[in-house]
Image (cartoon, grey):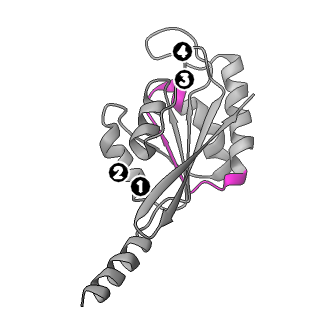
């Protein structure tokens, strides 16, 4: 009986849906102000990100409601014909749980403080984005063994 229960537990664990990849990045270069738009350089970076991330074949796009994150992910949304779904940057633990329950390749546009926090919540990896860095792109890939889930973290550059 114990062997049957153990086998059922392993089968259940392996059948849990997980994203194929979660791609996270900070918004592109922004102007100053309370809810700033992107600079010309930021608009160029957003277009570059769309080209860079299109081969990942995203299935879900997420962004905060700030202009800078929306404008950064919009070229990718236009390319993929996907709707950008909003998330609340003040509710990252709940958002991390939502992301873990999805399938496919998920792309998340965030901020210099929320992106590293979300990566830590999802994977335990510690990352940092300074206030002057706009080129870091992080790719989390889950790998499962019978009783363990690990997240591989790769860092790319949009330069």
Residue denoted by label 3 = 129
Q: Is residue 142 left or right of residue 101?
A: right
Inter-mark Cα distance, 1 to 2: 5 Å
Residue marked by disc 1:
100
Find residue 71 and name its label.
none
Q: How many marks?
A: 4
Q: Between disc 4 and disc 2, whose residue precedes?
A: 2
Q: Quadrant of the C terminus?
A: top right
Q: CA distance from mark 3 to mark 2?
A: 23 Å
Range of the magenta residues? 55-69
- Residue 52 position, x and y percent, is 73, 42
Q: Pick whichever, 133 or 76, lies toward us.
A: 133
Q: CA distance from mark 3 to mark 4?
A: 7 Å
**Element type at mark 1:** helix
Give me the residue at 59% from left, 39% from top: 138
* Residue beneath disc 4: 131
CA gap, disc 4 to disc 2?
A: 27 Å
């Amino acid at each position: 009986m114990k062997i049957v229960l153990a086998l059922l537990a392993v089968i259940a664990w392996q059948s849990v849906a997980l994203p194929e990849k979660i791609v996270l990045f900070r918004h592109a270069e922004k102007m100053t102000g309370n809810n700033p738009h992107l600079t010309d350089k930021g608009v160029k970076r957003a277009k570059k990100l769309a080209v860079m991330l299109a081969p990942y074949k995203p299935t879900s796009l997420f962004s905060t409601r700030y202009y800078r994150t929306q404008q950064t992910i919009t070229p990718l949304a236009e390319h993929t014909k996907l709707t950008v779904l909003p998330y609340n940057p003040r509710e990252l633990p709940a958002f991390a749980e939502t992301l873990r329950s999805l399938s496919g390749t998920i792309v998340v546009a965030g901020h210099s403080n929320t992106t590293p926090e979300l990566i830590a919540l999802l994977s335990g990896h510690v990352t940092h984005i300074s206030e002057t860095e706009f080129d870091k792109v992080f790719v989390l890939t889950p790998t499962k063994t019978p009783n363990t889930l690990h997240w591989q973290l790769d860092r790319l550059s949009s330069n």
